[in-house]
Image: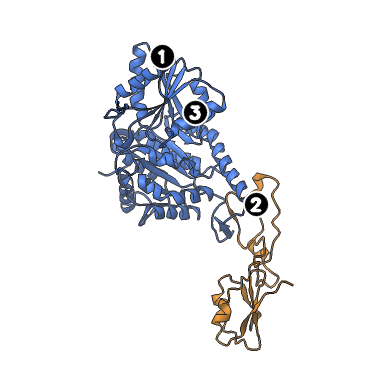
Amino acid sequence: MKLDNSKKLFVSGDEAVALGVRLARPHVISAYPITPQTVVVERLSEMVEDRSLDADFMHVESEHSALSAAMGASAVGARAFTATSSQGLLYMAEVLSYCSGGRFPVVMMNANRALALPWSIFGDQSDSLLLLGSGWIQCYVEDAQEALDMMIQAYKIAENSQILTPFMVNLDGFILTHTYELVDIPKQSQVDDFLPPFTTPNKMSLENPMNLGFSSTPADNLEFKYQQHQALLNALPIIEEVDDEFGDRFGRYYGGVLETYQTDDADFVMITVGSITGTTRVVVNTLREEGKKVGLIKLRYLRPMPEEALLEAIGDAKAIGVIDKDISFGHEGTIFTNVNSALAKSSVAIKKHNFICGMGGRNISKNDIKEMYKLLEDSTKGKDVPAVNFINLNTSVSEVE
Amino acid sequence: MKKTKDMLSEDGTRPVKQEFVKRAHISEYPTGPGFTAGHLADINAGWRAFRPIIDLKKCISCYKCYMVCPDGVIFKIGTKGVAVDYDYCKGCGVCANECPVKAITMIKETLD
């Protein structure tokens, strides 16, 4: 199917990403295919081939090289894009910290997928959550429209002179990458007005020869790390500004760092990341009809961690639940750890429960989410609910007598 | 920030050590580890155990040593002969090994 820039197209999440990338006019795309990201780079290579996208498409032999090439392109002042998933993202891990430490604002799409072993091509968020500390901005989207829109916003945020930090846009594997929906395609001229050409002080040029990406002794190393940390914190207000401006121009606002749904008077608030938000929103509607005071926080960014906005959104809730499609083995879900830290630093003492589910592509049903809300309510009524709960295990895990 | 050409010796053959003034505020740091090319903040030859000595009477100006030096510390003197920048020479001895007329000898460094 030809992906022209019609006003509306019925496309998959992966295709929406490709359309968004084309509108952002990257100079260089380097990528290695991996399920369920493959369609993104297939479509982009077709766009380069049919000249609807004026970019260099670099075929590389691995993910490590894909990001290395994108970083190199960024280091000469080019706008670069790459995409990956799961084991591919982990294979890139070394280059992730190079790219963020070098302050090269590459944008990458990651299709969230389970990690081996057991080998699985299905979705969960273990891959990107493992790399939260890599110095990249991490955003998680709920649907194909948001995926397309975030490709455009991502460059605007990453390339901001106060930020200059690479940006990872995460889509749940298959649930988002391979399902189809009607997507509104912004006009190229409107995107051009919104997203200025990339400029950076941090590039190789003949006019100003620079030594880029050098080593640093203990005497200066910490200062560079501090600067990187500060750049990510600087991103918090700029994410809001960019989202507002995007909304004003294109008619779609995403709430900036997070979106709240029915939280104002909610006693029980679920915190979701990515596509599970949609299902949870439906459950909130059902439970509200039953008179339950439930709400939902869709956490859109995990780095920078929007602690202040999160605390404000939690407000006077009696209990919160965190859905994690991952587990940091021997501890708890990674998102739970991050949310808990924000609460602990502000001495907020409410009931907090972690729901580990959806790993390796396991379905999370509306009933599962209802059950989670029920556990939150039980907990506030004095019932003993564990902090970390595996939801929807297919076998008994109770102790054998 | 200085330009690269301002960081060379008067005859333009060698980079000159530049004092790196510690920045008083984080905002004065470069964005990430990048800085004007050619800025050498330290001399770097502390671990040299053997020092290459060039006998210019034997030197035939073939510039083989100039080509093979891994640290780029051998430089041409005018149109004939070469010299070593001992501030940056690590004493690897590749030049002495490659010299076709044995004009370079490696002499043990002493602590005086």
* Same-chain status of marks 3 and 2: yes
The mark that comes first in sequence, 3 or 2, is 2
Residue at the image point whose x is 33% and y is 35% from the top = A359
Distance between the alpha carbons at the discs numbered 3 and 2: 34 Å
Q: Identify the residue position indicated by label 1 in the image.
A: A293
Q: Which residue appears farthest toward the right when viewing the image? A: B112
Crowd rating for badge 2 (residues with CA inside 10 Å; few <14, some 14–19, many 20+): few
Callout 2: chain:
A
**Foreground of the two, A157 or A178:** A178
**Three-letter code, disc 3:** Asn
Measured as percent of width and height from the top left, residue A243 is found at 47, 32
Measured as percent of width and height from the top left, residue A138 is found at 45, 39
Q: Is residue A68 visible?
A: yes
Crowd rating for badge 3 (residues with CA inside 10 Å; few <14, some 14–19, many 20+): some
Q: Identify the residue position indicated by label 3 in the image.
A: A340
Chain A drawn colour: blue
Q: How many marks?
A: 3
At numbered mark 2, what does the secondary structure look like: helix, strand or loop? helix
Measured as percent of width and height from the top left, residue A49 is found at 31, 53
Q: Identify the residue position indicated by label 2 in the image.
A: A219
Residue at the image point whose x is 32% and y is 41% from the top = A14
At numbered mark 1, what does the secondary structure look like: helix, strand or loop? loop
**Three-letter code, disc 1:** Lys
At numbered mark 3, what does the secondary structure look like: helix, strand or loop? helix
The mark that comes first in sequence, 1 or 3, is 1
